[in-house]
């Protein structure tokens, strides 16, 4: 992968807290897809596990071993701490991006939430066939897409966040086109106590745009039969 994961270093402390609202509507949908995963078909591979909000859903929906790949050290530290606090032994955390995962021979499912835009088109087309070859028959591969669907500007939104104790943690962001299918996100974060600014951070990263139908077409070309459910693309392996 070509993403500059070190750029998350300064913003990692904010991402678990500020990412929680993204899972409000997604958690039940993902759980429903994974609920029938065969426990004997191999591990579930989670790409871009982040701080483990999706990992929690995988664990709740399945009894499989989970391979949680996360290349950003700051996010991985949160994930590992949360797993250690629960003495969770079903999850193996892999310090790598999607194309560098040491893939097992068989996978019971693949999950990639909020991460497809980090993959350049050539990387996606290399990854999908590798997953298709390893997915157990009828095993799901679940991904979602995020706006913008095309390389268009995204204006900054109002600061949003949450309060823990006496401090409020907030974030905002904006994007500008940098290519025919690429934008550059500029994220800003801050910690304040009342009106006093205590800390701030920024993250800048590349994001490759894709809509659900285009992602479905890529999966189909690789041999994974897709279904589009709004922003969710659910693929099924067509062969063992």
Image (tube, grey):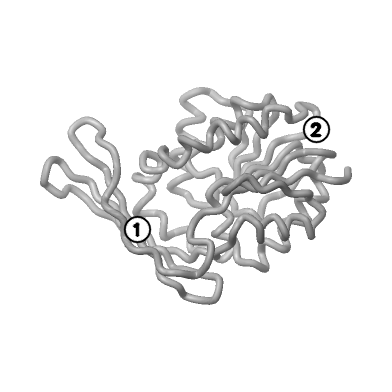
Query: Which of the two discs, 1 and 2, labels the residue nearer the N terminus?
Result: 2
Name the image quarter holding residue 45: top right
The quadrant of the picture occupied by the C terminus is top right
Q: Is residue 41 above or below residue 219?
A: above
Secondary structure, mark 1, is strand
Q: Is residue 24 above or below residue 15?
A: above
Q: Nearer the viewer, residue 17 or 234?
A: 234
Residue 66 is situated, as x and y percent measured from the top left of the image, at 65, 34
Q: Say whether residue 125 is left or right of residue 74.
A: right
Secondary structure, mark 2, is loop
Residue 29 is situated, as x and y percent measured from the top left of the image, at 59, 35
Q: Say whether residue 207 is left or right of residue 199.
A: right
Q: Residue at x 34, y 45 (%)?
A: 14
Q: Is residue 47 visible?
A: no
Q: Residue at x 30, y 57 (%)?
A: 188
Q: Residue at x 73, y 30 (%)?
A: 37
Q: Residues within 10 Å of mark 1 (few under 14, many from 20)?
A: some
The quadrant of the picture occupied by the N terminus is bottom right
Mark 1 and mark 2 in contact? Answer it, CB < 8 Å: no
Which residue is identified by label 1? 173
* Circle nearer the viewer, 1 or 2: 1
Residue 138 is situated, as x and y percent measured from the top left of the image, at 81, 38
Q: Is residue 75 visible?
A: yes
Q: Is residue 19 above or below residue 3?
A: above
Separation (CA) of disc 1 from disc 2: 40 Å
Name the image quarter holding residue 156: bottom left
Residue 16 is situated, as x and y percent measured from the top left of the image, at 40, 40
Q: Residue at x 77, y 28 (%)?
A: 38
Q: Which mark is residue 41?
A: 2
Judged from this view, the residue extending furthest toward the left is 195
Q: Which mark is residue 146?
A: none
């Amino acid at each position: 992968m070509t993403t500059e994961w070190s750029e998350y270093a300064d913003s990692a402390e904010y991402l678990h807290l500020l990412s929680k609202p993204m899972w409000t509507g997604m958690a039940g949908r993902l759980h429903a897809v994974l609920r029938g995963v065969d426990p004997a078909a191999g591990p579930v591979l989670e790409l871009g596990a982040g701080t483990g909000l999706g990992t929690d859903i995988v664990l709740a929906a399945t009894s499989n071993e989970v391979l949680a790949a996360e290349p950003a050290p700051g996010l991985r530290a949160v994930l590992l701490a949360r797993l250690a606090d629960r003495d969770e032994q079903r999850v193996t955390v892999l310090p790598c991006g999607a194309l560098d995962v040491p893939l097992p021979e068989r996978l019971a499912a693949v999950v990639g939430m909020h991460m497809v835009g980090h993959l350049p088109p050539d990387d996606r087309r290399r990854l999908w066939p590798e997953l298709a070859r390893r997915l157990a028959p009828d095993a799901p591969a679940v991904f979602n897409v995020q706006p913008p669907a095309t390389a268009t500007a995204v204006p900054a939104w109002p600061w949003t966040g949450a309060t823990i104790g006496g401090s409020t943690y907030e974030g905002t962001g904006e994007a500008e086109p940098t290519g025919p299918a690429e934008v550059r996100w500029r994220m800003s974060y801050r910690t304040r106590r009342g009106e006093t600014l205590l800390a701030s951070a920024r993250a800048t990263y590349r994001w490759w745009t894709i809509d659900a139908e285009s992602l479905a077409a890529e999966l189909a070309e690789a041999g994974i039969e897709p279904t589009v459910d709004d922003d969710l693309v659910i693929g099924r392996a067509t062969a063992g």
